Amino acid sequence: MNIFVGCSSREEIAKDYLDLATEVGDRLKGVHFIIGGSLHGMMGSVVKHIPKPDITQIILKDYVNEGESYSSSYQICETSFERMEHIWNATDIFLILPGGTGTLGEIITFLEENRMKKEKKKIIVFNYQGFYDDIIAFVEKTKEKKFCNDDILAGLSFANCLDEVVELMKG
């Protein structure tokens, strides 16, 4: 199973987010990880604690010098559009942890791709400590105001704890 993990790669974030990322990596050992950036911050914490990583890095050319490669496969992309296409094609399940605008862009892109495709992919957003409460409210508002159909939300799930994430990945 190929799992994309989208999250922050910033080093300045609070330690509890880094600890969360480490726990996610530990709980999901045995899957093939797809990561879309450098190995800093939460992203690095997810994968650096896996003994023999089964990881594909799909990264923008501009970020190649920001960190070492710790992956079994390394794909360099010229544009963010190309990067997202490669991530979409390589992934079975998308797992979104707390992150910034890059992570938000990934969520929106995956939702839109799911809407356009016949076969839907799972998008699991880990709402750790209510991090994505505003996104949940936005999604509900767009549905309520008829700015989107329910089909754009196909495959989208929110989890509030890691046990829920693991269950959603199984089901």
Image: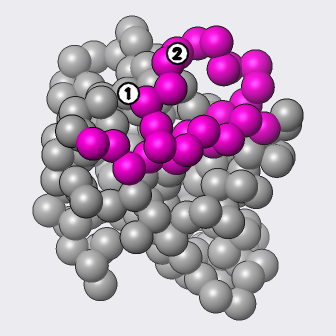
Residue 72: percent from left, percent from top: 47, 43
Judging by the rendered image, the residue that carries numbered circle 1 is 44
Q: Is residue 69 magenta?
A: yes
Kind of residue sitting beneath label 1:
Gly
Residue 128 vertical placement versus 49 (above, below): below
Q: Residue at 39%, 21% (x, y): give it.
A: 41
Mark 2 packing: few (<14 Cα in 10 Å), some, or many (20+)?
few
Q: Residue furthest bottom?
A: 118
Kind of residue sitting beneath label 2:
Gly
1 or 2: mark nearer the eye: 2
Q: Is residue 139 visible?
A: yes
Spatial separation of the CA atoms under disc 1 and disc 2: 10 Å
Residue 132 vertical placement versus 68 (above, below): below
Q: Residue at 73%, 82% (x, y): give it.
A: 117
Judging by the rendered image, the residue that carries numbered circle 2 is 67
Residue 74: percent from left, percent from top: 60, 39
Mark 1 packing: few (<14 Cα in 10 Å), some, or many (20+)?
many
Q: Residue at 55%, 76% (x, y): give it.
A: 121
On screen, residue 169 versus residue 71, left or right, reads left
Q: Quadrant of the C terminus?
A: bottom left
Query: Which of the labelled discs sits on residue 15, or is there none?
Result: none
Of the residues under marks 1 and 2, which one precedes in the sequence?
1
What residue span does the magenta drawing correspond to? 52-77
Q: Is residue 67 magenta?
A: yes
* Total number of numbered discs in the rendering: 2
Determine whether the residue tagged by mark 2 lies in a helix, strand or loop.
loop
